[in-house]
Amino acid sequence: MDLDFNEEQELLRATVRRICETSFDSAAVRKLEGERDKLDRAFWAALGESGICALRIEERHGGAQMGALNLAIVFEEFGQVLASSPFLQSAVHAADILSAVGSEDLAAEWLPKIAGGEVIVIPAWQEDELREAARPSHFDSASRTVSGTKMVVPFASVADAFLVRAATESGAGWALIPAQSDGIVITEQPNYASQPLFEVRFDHVHVAEGHFWPAAENSALSDDVLIAAAAEAVGAATRLLKITADYANQRKQFGRPIAGFQAISHPLADCATELEGVRYLTYQAAWAKDEGQDCAHLARMAKYSAAALFRRLATVAVQVHGGIGYSTEGEPQLFYRRSKYHELMYGTAAGLKKSIADHVLS
Amino acid sequence: MDLDFNEEQELLRATVRRICETSFDSAAVRKLEGERDKLDRAFWAALGESGICALRIEERHGGAQMGALNLAIVFEEFGQVLASSPFLQSAVHAADILSAVGSEDLAAEWLPKIAGGEVIVIPAWQEDELREAARPSHFDSASRTVSGTKMVVPFASVADAFLVRAATESGAGWALIPAQSDGIVITEQPNYASQPLFEVRFDHVHVAEGHFWPAAENSALSDDVLIAAAAEAVGAATRLLKITADYANQRKQFGRPIAGFQAISHPLADCATELEGVRYLTYQAAWAKDEGQDCAHLARMAKYSAAALFRRLATVAVQVHGGIGYSTEGEPQLFYRRSKYHELMYGTAAGLKKSIADHVLS
Amino acid sequence: MNFAFSEEEMAFLKDFQQYLEQEKAGPDSSVIFAPWRETDSWLVDSPERRGFMKRLAQAGYIGMSWEKQYGGRERPGVYDYLLNEELSSQGAPIIGKGVGCIGKTIIAHGSDKLKQEFLPQILAADIEFALGYSEPGAGSDLASLRLRAERRGDEWVLNGQKMWTTSAHFADWYWVAARTDPEAPKHKGISVFLVPMDHPGLTIKEIKTMGDHRTNEVFFDEVNIGPDYLVGEENAGWRYVCEALDYERFALYTVGPLLLKFEALVELAKVARRDGRPLSDDPVVRDRIAEFACEVEMATMLQRRVIAKAIKGEVPTVEAAMYKYFSTGLGRRIANYAIDCLGPLGLLKSGAPGAPFGGRWEMSDRATVVDTIGGGSTEVQKNIVARRGLGLMVGA
Amino acid sequence: MNFAFSEEEMAFLKDFQQYLEQEKAGPDSSVIFAPWRETDSWLVDSPERRGFMKRLAQAGYIGMSWEKQYGGRERPGVYDYLLNEELSSQGAPIIGKGVGCIGKTIIAHGSDKLKQEFLPQILAADIEFALGYSEPGAGSDLASLRLRAERRGDEWVLNGQKMWTTSAHFADWYWVAARTDPEAPKHKGISVFLVPMDHPGLTIKEIKTMGDHRTNEVFFDEVNIGPDYLVGEENAGWRYVCEALDYERFALYTVGPLLLKFEALVELAKVARRDGRPLSDDPVVRDRIAEFACEVEMATMLQRRVIAKAIKGEVPTVEAAMYKYFSTGLGRRIANYAIDCLGPLGLLKSGAPGAPFGGRWEMSDRATVVDTIGGGSTEVQKNIVARRGLGLMVGA
């Protein structure tokens, strides 16, 4: 029983923090929100050069093959500064999918480049399920083409390749498609969190031989993705809590700091408590992964709880800040809007809770 | 738009309050909790003599034929003092069932006596649905007998007659059975709220000719029952809020009244706000009933919300009182335990919410 | 007890609804009736909306409750309520602070000169006001405001800053609370002034908000105004500010937008699908909607209490505090839940391909955030309920 | 980072579990292992439970972390934790305040006489203590206690009243905080005394609680005690009281009972039926259970933080405050929800015909109410988190 990180991990945290703090402050976050691609190339290059992108990739594919706990550390730091990059999509999610592909050639070709941050591979799997008429993407094995429309695809505009989840007669699979292929149309999707989200339409896009394979898992989401998403929410919540506590100590009303009002301090205490709960729940999921235990249940609980806590805290933070919390010049709104993104992307509350209940009641 | 009661209604409230305050104080509530029958005969007689039992019964059956709003007033007052009597069961629920029976003779025989408080008729309809093996009560039309086991039947030990809900091949019906009939076994069911609840077993109990009729409604619960139950919870919550606010003003910690801490005052303010919401929701349901409008949806919302608020307030009240709130000598525990009774009897949250959603989403 | 409005009131409402139907056929309809604007749909912030207001005035709907001697119709205040309930339910600008707190304060406390200058313009909807109470250091603790008004000779000279002045960028006049006696206890040294919004000493700076809704900081640099534009008595301003709540008791507390929002959620559940079936088939969604249904009905009841008390001629302070924080918190939770129902696509803004319901809920969530903060925060309202409703011996 | 206990620790735990298996085969097993007693299952309040404790002592499980010179085994504190986690998970009495805060305070501050008199008895489980801190006017504000201890000649004479002394009716000695200097600031004038529970000046009055769990008021009427029974230094009592938290850091914060409660809820959902189908088929129930699952795991993490910090030799003040209020609130909500799941029959007590699960949940709900009040209320814990965890400038 030891809940401290080791020296190597602390070093990793320091490295990532330095890189993050170099690229991301509030002004940088705001600037990116106004751009189309929303990619800080310098930040991305730094992540590649420092070997951070290689974190979870196997050594034989040029990766660092570090543990999921290290991944959690990295994403906590990303969250702290609201860093924006295709790390989750490319170096985690796409790398996971490519690692499971079974084609050594494909893995050997792409993973080293992902590990170096040289290419950005973006999984495209989310579709419009709200409408009755929507037809799921499919792979036609005769013509070797993929057709369909993917929604809210992060960083699609900077992708070098897409991993497209598509249905076949025998189940779902993934197609690896260069972003420059004919038949791909990428349209920006302005959104609540000002994140780089895109609709990506695939119209009979050709898939090269060996570039389509059956999906190993039922869910589009891997343990690593859930753990990383949870850790990012934890990091963002940590920073926001700090900002809000500082503000409550400094802002005076009725002749004293508003921190002195329990209507302020107790909701913050509640958030602080739950934050530590979800922080270690996230670490535990990562630890279990590193121990080779079945960690999917923990990872789902971590993702659901972390995003929910972040959102709840964001609501409290805006309220504590009053008008400043609501104005765009204040910091809280950045976190408030981002918190909803965390809640909805990579597993919604409804979906995760269903899986959690399935596990508990099985 | 006028949310005040008229003079007649205020007079009714004053009358009921006087009767309640004569019979019920904390000591009386505690004394009854220790008895088997838990019936204050003097209180019951006073309700009968003053015509309160006749409130909702038609004039042609010796009733006062007053409105549902008046019923809400009466039950608010009952709730204020945690009065305990078979009024809801006999003068409301049984009277409702008998009014709908279609047999003028039966109504003419029983309703005047119910109106005078001379007889106590108790509907027995709740069964053990938790267990797989439990077999629902049924009426055998050949032998004219009812068999089955009813649970948590209030005031069964003082009943003069039971209205037993039982299944037949052609749907549910009600059987009117004198309590002294052969084959009835009544067993006390000690419970959380120390209310007079009983298991009542019917073993081939004979039903006289004309004393079984098909139930008009799907639900065992009438609008009046829901409105009365809601109003009783509102009344109890009103009193408990007053007790707790007084305590918070009087109890000092850290050199000042604990009312000065927002951790105390804001939860109480929340409860006060929601209490006024559910109070007028209850009145509105009753008003709609009196206006001849379809009020079932409002009545269900009122019952669910009132009981939920009462429970939430009871939890706050115990917490505000600290140790005294938890000790039997304090008042809050009486309300705390009663609040769960209100939540679970006469429509659970789960059941009511299902009906509410059916209505809203229809 | 009667939860319904009278036949006369309902007939009036019906007439007004017919009037609005005509307006909706007009060319500016889409600017005037804009429920998607949510929290700022009540503002008279465009020529089209000013035109609408002037037509309302010509049709006799403005100043219904003013005394006849000031050009009003002396109808009971409930008619003001019915008008604004209908307007807000349709996302139209409401009849606002000019005819409400400002006009009524001028009637009660203003000089003849102020009455002659302002009342006819208000009645004709020729004038829009901005309200200047909040300051950087005076939010919930409004009485600690520091904007300084010094007497210099005949004039008053104002220096300092106001914050969160929603209408500053389109209003004609500024109704400002300023400190005239810095030595007095904080509630005792405040006066109210009227300042022309185009005064060269005023600098208006936009504050953008996450609700896409504009508010402003206003800087006062040697803003000199004549003695006539002090409203009522010197140092009596705090009383006037507090009385405003009384004057607004019919106008501010509409429930229509909340009801619309809930209806839209119900519609969403019926239309949007998850796993191939309408959300309304999901028992978890049904359960949550049942809870919202109850809360919306409770909010409606709290709102009715405000109006019913106002109708009796009493000041619904506690009732308004209860309704304000309960309904605004509920509105936020409904918007938030609606996005959750929509899943990731709920993030999409109006105009984004695939944005469900035209991005309405994305907008709604951002727009409703201000509701629990502005106009007296939730915390302040709960203090009012605790102190004045429950009689709790609370501190500040 | 490692969420598991070491092999050595797990081996020790396994041995202890085997030891308990033997105990469970004994004749008093049903009195000793009584998880249904919920919040008071930790008390050594019957001859059977005292016997169990003495056997634990003989088997060497008591005083594991004491120094060898006092008869202990100088094992790390985590072994105390493992013992109590296992005991509490099985509803057995835990190794309590005698070997914990009282024994350790005597070791740290007590005279040789106190050490000689009490330490061997504690190690042998020959002695039970009651803790006397709370008073009618000193609950959350413990330091305002007023029980008066006056020096008269050689002796101390105590007059006044204690409240909420859980063990007074079966304990042998009373560990009492009293005011020895009424002139000093409230934290500075307190001393700690040991009083024999059978002193004729003590009157013990039962306080019944809604959890069927007995606590007591204790009245002191001229209770004279010798100078030897002042613990440590005069007027240093508040420090000793505060240090106790440190001494108890391994013993108090077990999570087993919460995990058991959640498992029982899951079992309930699988077994109990509604509308003819198991509750676990109901998506609304499933959704709620998923939420509880996450909260229970969060509580477990908060508990691990307490232990992990204690293992490092640090005092987990904030960690303990977080865990205490979060877990107790959660326990109450689980019990409350379980009754809701059962519907009206959930009201039935153990022994009532038809009581589901033997009335376990009915009992559980009443029993867990005290958890958010006793041992530092939820409000006090949140103040600690706000002030010491978040560095907020809070008042009291």
Image: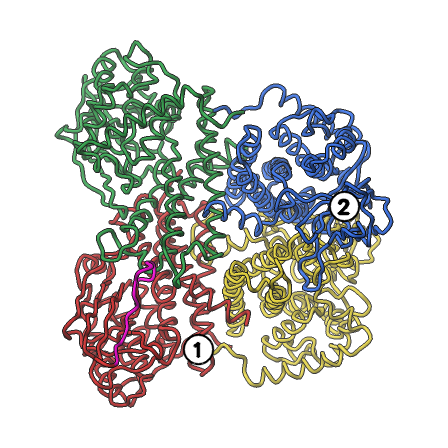
Chain colours: A red, B blue, C green, D yellow
Image position, residue D69 (x, y; %): 67, 79
**Would you name the residue on which mark 2 appears?**
B196
Query: Which residue is nearer to you in this view: C241 or C127?
Result: C127
Whether residue D259 is visible to the viewer of this picture, yes or no, is yes
Whether pointer 2 and pointer 1 mark residues with C-beta atoms closer than 8 Å, the reply is no
Tell me the number on the disc at residue B20.
Answer: none
* Residue B160 falls in image quadrant: top right
Q: Give x and y (percent) for residue D15.
A: 66, 84
Q: Tell me if I can see residue D317 in this picture.
A: no
Whole-percent x, y for residue C197 in the image: 18, 29
Which stretch is magenta?
Answer: A128-141
The secondary structure that most of the magenta stretch takes on is loop
To which chain does the residue with label 1 belong?
Answer: A
Residue furthest to the front in view is B142
**Cα gap from disc 2 to disc 1, whole angstroms:** 54 Å
Label 2 Cα neighbours within 10 Å, binned few <14 / some 14-19 / many ≥20: many
Q: Nearer the viewer, mark 2 or mark 1?
A: 2
Residue lying furthest top in this view? C69
- Numbered mark located on residue A287 in the image: 1
| In the image, residue A290 lies in the stretch drawn in magenta | no
Compared to residue A58, the image places residue B243 above or below, namely above
Give the residue type at disc 1.
Answer: Trp
Classify A71 as above or below B172: below
- Going by the image, does D155 lie left or right of B72? right
Q: Secondary structure at mark 2?
A: loop
